[in-house]
Amino acid sequence: MESSDKILGDITVLDLSQGVAGPFCAKLLAGLGAEVVKVEPPGTGDPSRRSEPFLGGRPGPENSALFAYLNTSKKSVSLDLEVPRQAQVLKRLAQDCGILVESFAPGYLDSLGLGYDTLSEADPGLIYVSVTPFGQSGPYRDYKGSDIVAQAIGALMYTIGLPDREPLKVGGEAALYTTGISAFSATMLALHVRDTQGFGQHVDISAMDCMTVAQIHSSIHYQFGRTPVRRETNLVQAKDGWVSPGLDIGVQAGTWPKVCQLMGVPELTDDPRFSTPEARRANQQELLGVVGGWAATKPKEEIYHTLQSLRTITGYVATVEDLLVSRQFAHREFFRIVEDSALGDIVHPGAPFRIDDTGWQLSRAPRLGEHNEEVLGGRLGLSPEELTQLFSGDRA
């Protein structure tokens, strides 16, 4: 791999992780130019290969949209870690890689002789990243988790939803992607430490920790005598969707009269219910009723741009279709087309950050075991006969 124009062009990552958070961390490392070798169970692969939706509506390990997204720019080798000779091959790969990312239950890889203590003896510079629901220590460490568990037990859900209803989950896998970004950030920091101080380390990422940090205001507010509560929605319905007008506290001094003129209600400029930010917050539902009457016949983007021109903190609820045609994203060349001879061209999101003069690496996700010969043969020097023996039915 050419490394001249890639930040991590001289780094090799062994990705043993499954699901979302760990693979997303490794995907970001691959995007910066690292050679990422994904290790998957033979025959079945990463469980995300079986996750819907399937491209073209065809279920199969090579057709999962989730896997296609999470594993761009990686290579795939298939190894059964519970087969001793294949575990030994993994040890050799680990010695040839600077970073290892894994998401197994704490202690599992140790039981196979593949834990941090064992592998770091051979390579003290190894950065070993463990991404789990609750971390490597504590009374919860062996508990299972998921995105909704992380959102719930990390208190994110405590603040979402209507006050008199059950708490709500943020859509998608927000907690797991946040955890993956945290793992990526910690890995980059560990790389800096290794480059400047010469040693590797075990990076312990807990989804519960990541969610609680994201909601730290809850604990701080509590200690200051204010318990965070769920509030009524601040959205109004436009002609074609929903808008957050941001007119309660997101209005600069002198702007409120202009907003009133715009909405055709100049008499509300000095109305004591709305004349100050504090009054508008206290009477938010009445304010939303006024704004909703004005917004109902207007497109959401027109409302957004009009109110933003008055320097209000306004937003609209975008659909996926809105994102794909967004002028902002188009200007930043955010979406990228990834060519795939089997699945067709797929539009992928780009990097979650911009770094000058650094290309973002984005190529299709690998087929299961696609790079066995290249990695195990080329990198480790295994002959065709040894590869055949490695994957024979004998589990010794």
Image (tube, rainbow, N blue to C red):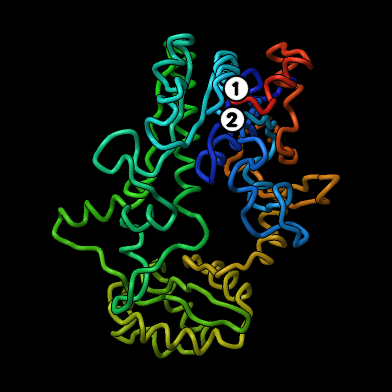
Q: As shown in the figure, which amino acid type bears the numbered disc 1? A: Gln
Give the residue at mark 1: 86
Give the residue at mark 2: 80
Please rate how many residues cluster around mark 1, counting C-alpha atoms within 10 Å: few if below 14, some from 14 to 19, many from 20.
Answer: some
Q: Nearer the viewer, residue 19 or 84?
A: 84
Counting the numbered discs, the total is: 2
Q: Is residue 139 above or below residue 313?
A: above
Q: Nearer the viewer, residue 265 or 56?
A: 56
Q: Residue at x 26, y 56 (%)?
A: 218
Dot 2 lies on which element? loop
Q: Nearer the viewer, residue 286 or 231?
A: 231
Q: Quadrant of residue 251?
A: bottom left
Q: Tell me: 337 left or right of 123.
A: right
Marks 2 and 1 in Cβ contact (< 8 Å): yes
Give the image location of residue 210, x and y in percent. Answer: 37, 44
Q: As shown in the figure, which amino acid type bears the numbered disc 2? A: Asp
Q: Earlier in the sequence, mark 2 or mark 1?
A: 2
Q: Residue at x 55, y 70 (%)?
A: 316
Q: Calculate the distance from the C-alpha at mark 2 to the C-alpha at mark 1.
A: 6 Å
